[in-house]
Image (cartoon, grey):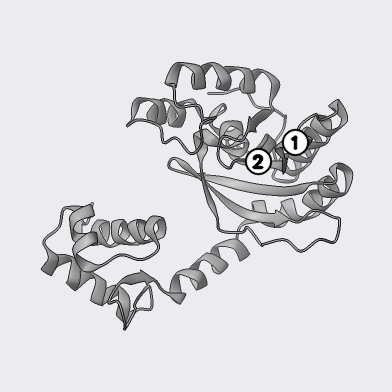
Amino acid sequence: MIQSVDRAVRILGALQGARRLSLSELATRLDLPPSTAHGILKTLQAHGMVLQDRDSNRYQLGPAVLKLGNVYLDTLELRSRAVTWSEELARRSGHAVRTGVLTYDEVVIIHHEPRPDGSRQMPEVGIVIPAHASALGKAMLAFLPDQADELLAGDTLRSMTSETVVDPGLLRKQLEGVARDALATEQEEAVLGEAGVAAPIFDASGLAVGAIGIVLPAVDWAQADATFAAVREAARNISRELGAHRWPVQPR
């Protein structure tokens, strides 16, 4: 591992989570000498990856990060395959649809299909959600046992709300059910008032590369079997277009 690159990536990760940080805060979080952190920040700033606020001197992510993110999305086959089926799932369910991928212990939303009711909604592409607190994350982790084991063996699981499952034993039991049913659910575990249902997406190698699901108000949780079937069908269709020979694929 190249130390300077590792430190730069860690700085970007810290800014992603905290939005704006001072030099001393970044140095403390990453256990780096301020002079070292400052040198890396200046390099990132020169490439547009980081910006410094003139008034507060705090650092934040720069526009080049967005440019890289857009390039990633444009070349991501999963996203292009998910668009049509997301529209269909939103129409059939009446709810917003998210497609996400797993990065370490978080889910990154790569496509968001708004509710088809014409209401004004915030775009959600790029938002991150703790994997253990989301239906999308559970749908993937259930079919990625090595990553699930790493997550459960790590530090204490972060509690987002009073409903977040943070007990490793209970979460593991949930994942076993998801692997059996190919359907994951969560109720107010990441955001109060919000619930979700998701199913895994597989590629030609049989790897769980993403998940698709609906997000809805928790008060509307009473879902019909037809909605669950629609979520599974969307995941199955995207998987088929990615070359998967069967759905679901048993965890390995």
Q: Is residue 245 above or below residue 44?
A: above
Lateral position of residue 12 relative to residue 147, left or right: left
Q: Are marks 1 and 2 in contact (CB under 8 Å)?
A: yes
Residue nearest the viewer, comparing 131 with 187: 187
Q: Position of residue 142 (x, y in %)?
A: 56, 26
Q: For the image shown, how many numbered marks are present on the structure?
A: 2
Q: Is residue 191 above or below residue 43?
A: above
Query: Callout 2: few (<14), some (14-19), or many (20+) C-alpha neighbours within 10 Å?
Result: few
Lateral position of residue 24 relative to residue 56, left or right: left
Lateral position of residue 138 relative to residue 196, left or right: left
Q: Position of residue 179 (x, y in %)?
A: 62, 21
Query: Image quadrant of residue 229?
Result: top right
Is residue 159 visible in the rendered image? The answer is: yes
Q: Position of residue 153 (x, y in %)?
A: 35, 25
Disc on the earlier residue, 1 or 2: 2
Q: Position of residue 222 (x, y in %)?
A: 80, 29
Residue under numbered circle 2: 193
Residue under numbered circle 1: 219
In terms of secondary structure, where does tag 1 sit?
Answer: helix
Residue at point 65%, 41% (across, down): 193
Residue flagged by tag 2: what amino acid is it?
Answer: Gly
Residue at point 35%, 30% (across, down): 156
Residue flagged by tag 1: what amino acid is it?
Answer: Val
Label 1 to label 2: alpha-carbon separation:
7 Å
Lateral position of residue 159 relative to residue 197, left or right: left
Residue at point 53%, 31% (across, down): 141
Q: Is residue 55 above or below residue 97?
A: below
Is residue 206 visible in the rendered image? The answer is: no
Residue nearest the viewer, comparing 232 with 250: 232
The single residue placed furthest to the bottom in the displayed view is: 54
